């Protein structure tokens, strides 16, 4: 029983211990906040120092025999630079070049300038197939005369994408 307004010693000690613990906790939290702010400042400083500098990667040299090339099976036909087989500009390819020996019309999944190998002859993809063949494995090699194109016919061959 408490006779006067005085707080018992044991209760006073408990309250003081709790205040000290909270004071330590706040001090610890301030230290952590300071460390985090310092780390962020250091990171920002170093990032700002390397801004604008490019990191370059130099690929190791690879022998041509080590390069994996894609080989697909495709239908190969032939065409000539005549208006009845092309459009009103028969000598102009879709890439803007001139059709000639080594030209081939390719499906749209191959970029212009891609080199392919058909029966050990290298062709450059510089033209496009008719819309109905653009998504298939269908190629059209250029020939100088209709006779050569007819002799080529329609062949199922291996095409090596270089």
Image (cartoon, rainbow, N blue to C red):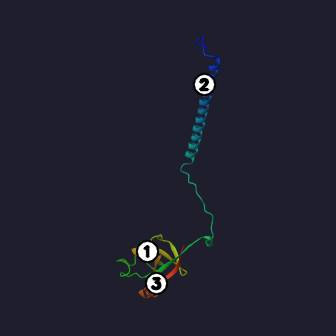
Q: What is the CA distance from the residue labelled 2 to the residue labelled 1? A: 83 Å
Of badges 2 and 1, nearer the viewer stands 2
Graded by Cα atoms within 10 Å as few (under 14), some (14 to 19) or many (20 or more), the crowding at tag 1 reads many
Disc 3 designates what residue? 154
- Marks 2 & 3, CB-CB < 8 Å contact: no
For this orientation, the residue located farthest to the top is 4
Quadrant of the rendered structure where residue 37 is?
top right
From the top left corner, tell me how far across and down residue 48 is, in percent: 55, 45
53 to 154, vertically: above or below: above
3 to 118, vertically: above or below: above
Return the mark for residue 19: 2
Compare residues 75 and 62 and report the one nearer the observer.
75
Under tag 1, what secondary structure?
strand
Residue at the image position 48 percent from the left and 83 percent from the top? 155
- Marks 2 & 1, CB-CB < 8 Å contact: no
Disc 1 designates what residue? 127
Residue at the image position 43 percent from the left and 78 percent from the top? 99
From the top left corner, tell me how far across and down residue 35 is, in percent: 60, 37
Under tag 2, what secondary structure?
helix
Compare residues 146 and 77 and report the one nearer the observer.
77
Of badges 2 and 3, nearer the viewer stands 2
Q: What is the CA distance from the residue labelled 2 to the residue labelled 3? A: 93 Å
Mark yes or no: residue 39 visible.
yes
For marks 2 and 3, the one nearer the N-term is: 2
For marks 2 and 1, the one nearer the N-term is: 2
Graded by Cα atoms within 10 Å as few (under 14), some (14 to 19) or many (20 or more), the crowding at tag 3 reads few
Q: What is the CA distance from the residue labelled 3 to the residue labelled 1? A: 18 Å
The N terminus - image quarter:
top right
For marks 3 and 1, the one nearer the N-term is: 1
Q: How many marks?
A: 3
Return the mark for residue 57: none
């Amino acid at each position: 029983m408490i006779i006067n307004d005085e707080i018992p010693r044991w209760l006073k000690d408990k309250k003081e211990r709790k205040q000290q613990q909270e004071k330590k906790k706040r001090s610890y939290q301030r230290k952590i906040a300071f460390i985090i702010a310092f780390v962020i400042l250091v990171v920002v400083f170093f990032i700002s120092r390397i801004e604008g500098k490019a990191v370059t990667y130099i690929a190791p040299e690879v022998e041509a025999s080590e390069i994996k090339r894609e080989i697909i099976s495709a239908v190969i036909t032939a065409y000539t630079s005549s208006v009845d087989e092309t459009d009103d500009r028969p000598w102009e390819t879709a890439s803007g070049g001139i059709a000639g020996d080594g030209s081939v019309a390719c499906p749209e999944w191959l970029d212009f300038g891609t080199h392919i190998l058909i029966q050990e002859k290298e062709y450059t993809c510089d033209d496009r197939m008719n819309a109905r063949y653009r998504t298939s494995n269908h190629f059209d090699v250029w020939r100088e005369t209709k006779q050569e194109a007819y002799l080529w016919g329609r062949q199922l061959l291996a095409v090596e994408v270089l």
